[in-house]
Amino acid sequence: MNENYEIAVVGGGIVGVSTALHLLMRGAKVALIDRGPPELATSYGNAGIVGTFYLLPFDPPPFSQMLNVLLNRLPSVHIQYRHLPKSIGWIARYYLNSRREQRRILGRLYWPLIADAIREHKTLMQGTDAERYLTAHGNAFLFRTEASFASKSLELEEARQRGVPYKIMSAAEFGDIEPDIKPIYSKALYWPGNVRLTNPGAVVTAYTEKFVRDGGKFLKAKAHNLQSNGDAWRVETSNGTIQAQQVALCTGPWTGDFFRPLGYRFPLEMKRGYHRHFSAIGGAKLAHAICDVDVGYYLCPMEQGYRITTGAEFAAVDAPPTPVQLDQVLPYARELFPLGEPVESKAWLGSRPCLPDSLPIIGPAPRHKNLWFNFAQNHAGLTSGPASGRLLAEMIRGEKTFCDPYPYRADRF
Ligand SMILES: Cc1cc2nc3c(=O)[nH]c(=O)nc-3n(C[C@H](O)[C@H](O)[C@H](O)COP(=O)(O)OP(=O)(O)OC[C@H]3O[C@@H](n4cnc5c(N)ncnc54)[C@H](O)[C@@H]3O)c2cc1C
């Protein structure tokens, strides 16, 4: 195969497929390249929440807990020690960005990609069957201690200022919504404006099918080399070469495989996360995704079962799995909800691609003509993916952009 396209989008997770669809809607001849299978992508295995509660960058444990973090004593964080020399500088920069005022600033810079996320998803859902995975039952945080509730004060302040609805509830009040959650917590923080996708991987597949139906070319292949003749690009893949005037790199956690050979040194770190599905005992039911804040995991009702997702593991993207956090959080989850047996034999592993300021890179490559980046949507990429795709498509087509792309520029590093 040796085909010519206006734009080749490499990577077909939520960010890549959204970028490809938005380019197609704008009349471009687009090829979308993904190596599959979908279960490899981060967009497959997340907690499924799409919502405006991503008001601030994800907060690390308090600095006073640093020793416990480094000794792998907290279930919310795990470090593979052989990776520590690579990640320690990144972790230091992340902590510097986690000061209160800096979090507020960074949260506001990310906000344009979040504010209209539900509508952005609904635009892509049109003409697909993805809406059947959309539920209005969003998510809630449960706090076992008053101290952990107090740690969310900045989030609540920002929610009030940005008009994001929330309800603070007692365990008895929240029990009316979720009667099968045991009232062993002191408070719930309910986000009524959020929604969830009960099978995010199937939603990405539905968007890909729409892309193909509307005339896009989907190539299931591993891209292994990018070459430019100064104007156009050759994308060499395991299934032939694609020629394209422009290339958009949307390869999430694997984007370093492409930017490093081109000479870029972005501080892209992985916060890996695991999930596993469980049955429920005695017909117990849960409608919303629950975050057990003091412990650091999510329990989410999904198509495949009750999905437990873990916090962050610092490790190389392709290092062998060490799902110890799942073992650590499982007793807490069982205390909260009557979980039964695991549905599958082993845990799923994915990687949140993160930069130390928790903002993505969306825009042109600084030193290569007709090369574009769209990656590092960190903890909130299922939410921000469609808006990120729209923003990059508007930039590539030279349109007026719906928000200022300056905070996401690549040359800030
Ligand atoms: C446990 C967990 C829970 C999360 N929960 C939420 C949540 O509730 N809400 C939310 O908004 N976000 C959540 N996130 C974050 C979100 O899932 C990610 O930010 C988002 O999925 C990243 O999307 P992406 O398209 O950039 O990357 P990916 O989905 O990983 O897609 C990258 C794609 O690139 C392809 N690729 C890579 N290299 C090549 C190559 N050489 N050739 C061809 N193709 C290639 C891969 O096959 C893959 O399909 C969570 C993440 C995790 C890990």
Image (tube, rainbow, N blue to C red):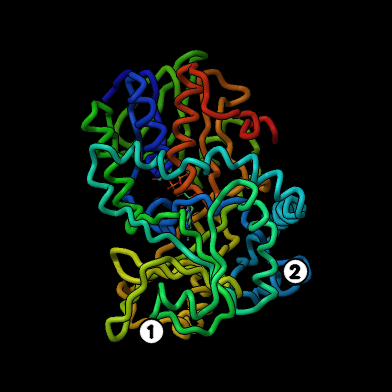
Q: Quadrant of the N terminus?
A: top left
- What percent of the width, then of the height, locates residue 4? 32, 18
- Of callouts 2 and 1, the N-terminal one: 2
- What percent of the width, then of the height, locates residue 241? 34, 26
Residue 344: image quadrant is bottom left
Which residue is labeled 2 in the image? 66
Query: Looking at the image, which is closer to me, 326 or 165?
Result: 165
- Front position among marks 2 and 1: 1
Residue lying at 27% horizontally and 81% vertically, measured from the top left: 283
Q: Quadrant of the C terminus?
A: top right
Indicate left or right for 397 with 345 as reference: right
- What percent of the width, then of the height, locates residue 77? 61, 68
Q: Amino acid at mark 2?
A: Met
Which class describes the residues within 10 Å of circle 1: few (<14), some (14-19), or many (20+)? some
Residue lying at 45% horizontally and 34% vertically, measured from the top left: 389
* Number of numbered labels in the structure image: 2
Residue 74: image quadrant is bottom right
- What percent of the width, then of the height, locates residue 131? 28, 48
Above or below, 212 relative to 335: above
Above or below, 305 relative to 379: below
Secondary structure found at label 1 = loop
Which class describes the residues within 10 Å of circle 2: few (<14), some (14-19), or many (20+)? some
Gap between marks 2 and 1 measured at Cα: 33 Å
Residue 68: numbered disc: none
Residue 338: numbered disc: 1
